[in-house]
Amino acid sequence: MDLDPQLYEGLPDPVRKAWERSLTSGRAAMSRRRLLRLGSLAAGGAALAACGIPPAEGSRGNEPEDNPDYSKKERVLNFANWPLYIDVDDKNKKKRPTLDRFERESGVKVKYVEDINDNSEFYGKIKPQLAAGQDTGRDLVCLTDWMAGRVIRQGWAQRLDPARIPNAVANLEDRFRTAAGDPGRQYSYPWAGTACVVAYNKKATGGKKVTSVSQLLEDEALKGKVSMLSEMTDTVGLTMLDMGIDPGKFTDRDFDKVIARMQKAVDGKQLRRFSGNDYLDELNSGDIAACLAWAGDIVQLKLDNPDIEFALPESGYLFGTDDLLVPAKARHQANAEALINYYYQPEVAAELAAWVNYICPVSGAKAEMEKIDKDIAKDPLIFPDAKTIERGKNFRPMSTAEQARYENKFAKLIGA
């Protein structure tokens, strides 16, 4: 695979290789939604504070006067998102009910492109235009919190107009209203929340519950049947929590302790492997008895396999968000804001959440979900209760140098 040299910005070779691998096996490469048997959607049709990065380093260059808006003349919107991260019609997969309805109500034609398969890969695509002060050809993008924060820090996102997104301003749940990479939510709003948890196949464990990272790393009964994620922040973050280390405040020494502990598990053959979304098939079959997993995947997998269970470790779990933002120099900011505002209607947010199965950031959506699917409305991985929210933790912002150093060490651990 040929890699854009600007993508890695001088990172060590092991880090480059690890990210290259992530294009097909990392969190960002996962299928965002397995097809669900939710026939009621057509009839019913109608999170968490984000982990970010340090404050801005460069000039803004993203104020309204620098970005003429052609939304009134050009009733179009170019929206880049992850694969399978929006609702589709059961009978016609080319139809997206909520998005189709937005087009009818707003008169805005949306070019919806699923071209974000990896945060760093996508950043490499749009960075040359952003750095040159040019339009990327995308009016709205959905990036994981840490990457959204990076774009904002570099002055490459447009400040949103609160007057044009009243639903978002009013209905964003309180716990999402600040983000390390975007204090005050001036530039971004969550599309969905994410959570990394412990999961297991109770048939493969002989009925034994697996509820902690310590079990994954040290339980002899699980030896050789454990996987952890190839996404550094998730795997390291959950292991930190298990060791009593706050992933929001850790030091280099703390990081090294975590790597040493995991290295012991690797050397002792406790871990089967580090994986991306391909852990799902092995967990489903029982080849993997227990693992670290993304909550949205587990919600989906449990629909087809009653042996699949999850646990929120007592020590805590890791959470984040995937955020919508308008790139600098985008031609249709008002149209993008209209779409953000539309998806922050509780009934629309509920319909979306019923399909993607990730944490919903919109107040009032749970009540609307009860009209669609009462079981989903009760699911703590989609609508967390207060206790679940309290146990969620963020991985702290990293400087460019820190990220290079940590990714290098992690890449060596997982053999990337």
Image (cartoon, grey):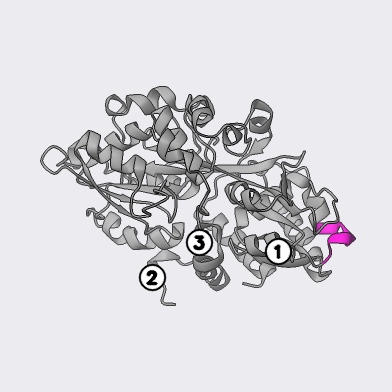
Cα–Cα gap, marks 2 and 1? 37 Å
Q: Foreground mark, 1 or 3?
A: 1
* Pointer 2 residue: 4
Q: Is residue 67 magenta?
A: no
Disc 3 secondary structure class: helix
Residue drawn at the location 27% of the way across and 52% of the way down: 138
* Pointer 1 residue: 285
* Pointer 3 residue: 29
In which quarter of the view is residue 324 placed? top left
Residue drawn at the location 77% of the way across and 67% of the way down: 266
115 relative to 22 in the view: left or right: left
Q: Amino acid at mark 2?
A: Asp
Cα–Cα gap, marks 1 and 3? 21 Å
Q: Is residue 1 above or below residue 302?
A: below
In the image shown, does 172 or 200 lie closer to the viewer? Answer: 200
Q: Foreground mark, 2 or 1?
A: 1
Q: Foreground mark, 2 or 3?
A: 3
